[in-house]
Amino acid sequence: MNSVKLSILSPCYNGDKFIARYLDNILEQTFMDFEVIIINDGSKDNSNEIIHKYQKIFADKGIAFKYLNKKVNEGHAKAINDGLKLVDGQYLMWPDIDDYMHKNHLEAHVKYMESHDSVDLAIGKSAVYNIKNLSTPLYYAWEKFPVTKEKLVNEFILAEDKNIGFMSGTFIIKTDFLWKIYPDRNIYSEIFVGPTIQMVFPALYLGKTGYIKECTFDYYIHGNNQHIANEKRDFSSIQIVYENVVNHLKLDNNESERIKRMARNVTNRLNLGYAIKNGEKKMGIDAWRNLSKDDGIRFKEIIKYLILKIEPLRRLYLKTI
């Protein structure tokens, strides 16, 4: 039986600029039936000292505060994986420590799940800000919710629309559902990234997804977001994560290959764009060939390939972006 309604799991790596504000942000929430799980992923700054101070503050308020202080940085996915073993809540949320939750963020998400018993995963609208200008959002992620399950799944995999956000703090999932997918509470963590895909995609594909229209979460773009800082990744991590998720779910061969092909196309389209920006012609040509094999070439890829091949055109393109 779950001992608390909600578990809040957050890794921290060199987050001493953010962690105090984040923990204060949790303490000001209007919903308080939760536990906090912080995984310090081998930080080399003052994160450990700050977290220890807050352990006492939470204890004095009677709030469960679980803390794992790792000596070695192993990456976001492994930190989440470690934290899953400590989860006791009926629901799970996993915000990043450098974002901001409105005071009713937890309440809105738990209240939605409580009033929609058949929902396994709920996604909330979030505002995306440039950290240099907090007066006006750049855009809203999940402002429009895909109208069908198929569209939701496909758009999530392709991730080409800003409307589809991967801000981890916007998701809430039933742990009963999550443990059915991962009964040993182990997600793939051999690469540094990808935990949100591994937890969200199975629910999108196999479960029932709900949508919280109210915007209660702010995501800040400032070049040092905690979920990507100091992480050894390249675009191939996308297809690697999906290959592992699909294999884990044991989908039929046709559907498994369809999803893997979409993920490969995402990787190669990103590689093509990177090749143009950085003059990596061989990378771009390899990406083009891979897209050709997977029927992933659209009109925009044809244009990008021409830009890659014609150097004056590439230089002109770079001046316009």
Image (cartoon, helix red, strand yellow):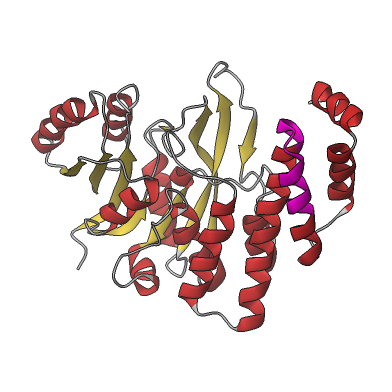
Q: Main secondary structure of the magenta part?
A: helix
Name the residue: 61% across, 26% down. 137
The answer to whether residue 195 is above or below residue 246 is above
Viewer-side residue, 310 vs 249: 310
Name the residue: 22% across, 59% down. 88
Viewer-side residue, 147 vs 308: 308
Image quadrant where residue 315 sits: top right
5 on left or right of 113: left
Viewer-side residue, 316 vs 139: 316
138 on left or right of 203: right
On whether residue 130 falls in the magenta region, the answer is: no
Q: Position of residue 31 (x, y in %)?
A: 30, 43
21 on left or right of 100: left
Q: Position of residue 277 (x, y in %)?
A: 73, 32
Q: Quadrant of the C terminus?
A: top right
Name the residue: 78% across, 66% down. 293
Q: Which residues are magenta?
A: 276-288
The answer to whether residue 91 is above or below residue 142 is below
Image quadrant where residue 221 sits: top right
Q: Position of residue 13 (x, y in %)?
A: 32, 34
* Furthest residue in direction front, as rendered: 282
Q: Quadrant of the N terminus?
A: bottom left
